[in-house]
Image: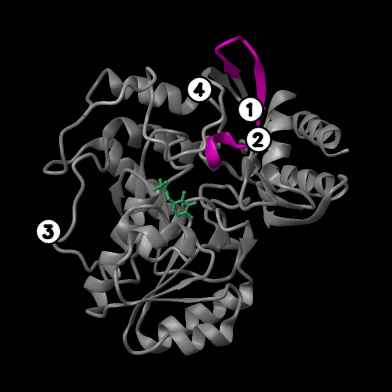
Amino acid sequence: MSTVTAPGAVLPTYARQDVTFVSGEGAWLVDADGGRYLDFLAGIAVVGLGHCHPAPLAAAEAQLRRLWHTSNLYWTEPMQLLAERLSERFGGARPFFCNSGGEAIEAAIKWARRVTGRPGIVALHDSFHGRTLGALSVTGQPAKRAAFEPLVPGVSFVALNDAEALAAAVGPGTALILLEPVQGEGGVHPASAEFLAAARSLADRHGALLVLDEVQAGMGRTGTFFAWEQLGVRPDAVTLAKGLANGLPIGCLLVADSAPAGFEPGDHGSTFGGNPIVCAAACAVCDSLTPELLAEVGRRGEQLSLGLGKLPGVLEVRGRGLLLAGELDRPAATVIEAARERGLLVGSAGERTLRLTPPLVVTSAEVERALTILEEVLA
Ligand SMILES: *Cc1c(COP(=O)(O)O)cnc(C)c1O
């Protein structure tokens, strides 16, 4: 039996908005009819340096003409250069490269179980770690999980910033404490420094590993290269993905030198992981995240959150740096649509939560323009 579908149709896993983009530059996108949009979603916190930024573009283009793929049976220079850069930023660490955030979480789960020989994982309610079965198993959102059970066993969930509940959940069977420094998809809720300190000391006391999922919050998004730098807690590993190559697919589990390597040859792998083109782009991203740009992220974040808090219908502003959300007195979907019609792209993180993750290079004038459009929409 065959059904005729529309040309270009894909499986309906997304509630896709009916607009087709054909080009982009900086914080701006252009649709197929020539309409221009100020992009305050940046591909869901991915295109940190803005669309077609010259540095990763030149790096990827040069590598594209030199070498595409060799497999992980050999070394390539871009992969080693990226490993060096990430290690330097972390203060001593070794990466495993893969192709997405979900895959980075899969690697983190396997690594923690391999190192500790234990099954247990403690994660948080309302967390988001990806859609693959392992990543879904540690994602604390019942609506996303229910249809796909049974999932990976051994996972328990506690509330964000509830150190007492965390202490009750972590024990001698715990391999991994996994949390986002700022819960992204779950509504842009920052973890408190006290909660992270509690997680660190519980992991140390019980011989568990603390992994911070910085897939969304990392790569300068909160105003420091890693979000943990602002929180006074050094994790045993972080996961990275979204902003790492400015839109080319990449994921990474970055394990601190102070933690066991765990993996041995044959334990884990990825055919495409560490792809030279993508790693060359990611090196350029790392080099572009200068102290000046990171300081600017803080300033633009302050400007945007202050402005957002003054808008009609915004009940609360949450987040760090340029990972921000406004809790609204109305459904976010209608605001997203009206803003798009006025040439501004924004996202949601929950029914009434407006999510703003502009490129890190967004200008003060662009922030003002976005606030003006949002004010019109919300008035
Ligand atoms: C987006 C996201 C993921 C999943 O990344 P994919 O590349 O979509 O698999 C995991 N963790 C966090 C915190 C995310 O924001």
SS type, badge 1: loop
Using the numbered discs, state the Cα–Cα distance from disc 3 to disc 2 in whole angstroms: 42 Å
Pick the quarter of the image with the C terminus. top right
Of labels 3 and 1, earlier in sequence is: 1
Q: Can residue 93 be seen in the rendering of this structure?
A: no
Examine the rendered structure and indicate whether residue 39 appears above or below residue 301: above
Of labels 3 and 4, earlier in sequence is: 4
Using the numbered discs, state the Cα–Cα distance from disc 1 to disc 2 in whole angstroms: 7 Å
Q: Can residue 375 be seen in the rendering of this structure?
A: yes
Residue 77 drawn at (x, y percent): 25, 36
Residue depicted at 70% across the width and 51% down the height? 352
Residue 83 drawn at (x, y percent): 33, 48
SS type, badge 3: loop
Find residue 27 and name its label: 1
C-beta proximity under 8 Å, tags 4 and 2: no
Of labels 4 and 1, earlier in sequence is: 1
Pointer 2: what residue? Answer: 40
Q: Nearer the viewer, mark 3 or mark 4?
A: 3
**Front one among 321 and 133:** 133
Q: Which residues are magenta?
A: 30-44
Magenta stretch contains residue 243: no
Of labels 4 and 2, earlier in sequence is: 2
Pointer 4: what residue? Answer: 54
Q: Amino acid at mark 3?
A: Pro
SS type, badge 2: loop
Q: Amino acid at mark 4?
A: Pro
Task: Identify the image's colour scheme: rainbow, by chain, secondary structure or one colour.
Answer: one colour
Callout 1: 10 Å neighbours few (<14), some, many (20+)?
many
Q: Amino acid at mark 2?
A: Phe
Using the numbered discs, state the Cα–Cα distance from disc 4 to disc 1 in whole angstroms: 13 Å
Using the numbered discs, state the Cα–Cα distance from disc 4 to disc 2 in whole angstroms: 20 Å
Pointer 3: what residue? Answer: 265
